């Protein structure tokens, strides 16, 4: 009798990662929203001289500096909060996750491959968005690592929130819609429609305890030469830990 060896976990994970990369590349709308749109926005602002000049109304920051953290929050939340719940919901509805449980490949490997892919794409976009203002002379190159140091935990927090949405909402359409709504809330608290420098005190306090607001606050502090402080990281850690715990407890493969 011939015995077929189970695929090595590392090779299986690599195959899943390649598969998810191909599937993501076939969805142009996702790439436009998460990659092209925020990069285009920051490039356009960087090309406008008036957007690079400090303004008293923005606390001495330029428009480019004020909106850079907001656009980075936009980029990090789209894949995590909208695409991740939608994809997992579709896989669940199609029975793909259920069938996967009968193979040597664990569904958790699929989830891990999706998270690694989305984290990688988001961090690449974030790195470019940190560099663009520096190229046109806005900001300090020595602060770039600190900006990314805030961006990484913020992205991880958004991914756990996306996993939580996928865990508690079985429908892919409803999960995607809920994720988009939550992303819009994060953008508001990050200052997309109303500059954070002009938030009233009570709204700024509320915003600072949301992942979007905490990430934007920390990145803004770093961009203007300050320190991010402990509060944004405590906020992100709390949201990350609670979301991850609830997602693991509530997640169903069928």
Image: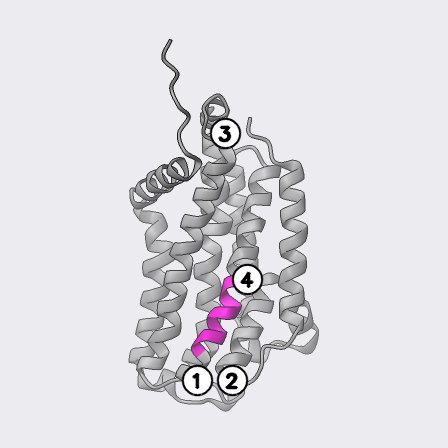
10 Å crowding of disc 1: few (<14), some (14-19), many (20+): some
Picture coordinates of residue 104, whole percent (x, y):
46, 26
Compared with residue 24, is residue 139 higher up or lower down, i.e. above or below? below
Q: CA distance from mark 3 to mark 4?
A: 28 Å
Are the residues flagged by discs 1 and 4 in contact, CB closer than 8 Å? no
Residue hosting label 1? 62
Q: CA distance from mark 1 to mark 4?
A: 25 Å
* Element marked by disc 2: helix
Tell which circle, 3 or 2, labels the residue nearer the N-terminal end. Answer: 2
Which secondary structure type mostly characterizes the magenta part of the structure?
helix
Q: Which residue is mark 3?
A: 92
Relative image position of residue 101 (x, y in whole percent)? 50, 25
Q: To which residue does mark 4 refer?
A: 153
User: Within 10 Å of the Cα at label 2, are there few (<14), some (14-19), or many (20+) other Cα atoms?
Assistant: some
Give, as a single range, the part of the protein colored magenta: 144-154
Residue visible at 31% across and 73% down in the picture: 44
Residue situated in front as seen by the camera: 122 or 47: 122
**Where residue 234 sits in the image (x, y, percent)?**
67, 66
CA separation in Å, label 1 and label 3: 46 Å
Q: CA distance from mark 4 to mark 2?
A: 26 Å
**Residue indicated by mark 2:** 58
Say which label, 1 or 4, has the lower sequence index: 1
Q: Was residue 177 drawn as part of the magenta stretch in this picture?
A: no
Q: Quadrant of the C terminus?
A: top right
């Amino acid at each position: 009798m011939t015995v077929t060896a189970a695929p090595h976990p590392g090779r299986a994970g690599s195959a899943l990662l390649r598969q998810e990369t191909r599937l993501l590349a076939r969805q142009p709308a996702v790439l436009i929203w998460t990659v092209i749109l925020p990069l285009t926005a920051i490039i356009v602002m960087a090309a406008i001289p008036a957007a690079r000049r400090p303004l008293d109304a923005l606390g001495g920051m330029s428009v480019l500096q004020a909106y850079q953290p907001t656009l980075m929050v936009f980029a990090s939340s789209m894949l995590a909060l909208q695409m991740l719940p939608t994809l997992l919901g579709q896989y669940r509805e199609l029975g793909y996750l259920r069938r996967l449980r009968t193979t040597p490949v664990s569904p958790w490997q699929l989830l891990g491959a999706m998270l690694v892919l989305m984290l990688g794409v988001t961090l690449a976009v974030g790195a470019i968005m940190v560099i663009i203002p520096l190229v046109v002379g806005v900001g300090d190159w020595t602060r770039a690592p600190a900006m990314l140091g805030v961006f990484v935990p913020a992205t991880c927090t958004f991914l756990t929130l996306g996993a939580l949405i996928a865990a508690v909402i079985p429908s892919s359409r409803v999960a995607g819609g809920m994720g988009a709504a939550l992303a819009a809330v994060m953008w508001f608290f990050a200052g997309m429609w109303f500059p954070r420098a002009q938030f009233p005190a009570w709204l700024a306090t509320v915003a600072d305890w949301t992942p979007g607001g905490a990430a934007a606050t920390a990145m803004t502090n770093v961009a203007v030469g300050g320190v991010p402080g402990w509060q944004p990281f405590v906020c992100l850690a709390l949201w990350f830990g609670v979301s991850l715990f609830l997602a693991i407890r509530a997640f169903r493969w069928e």
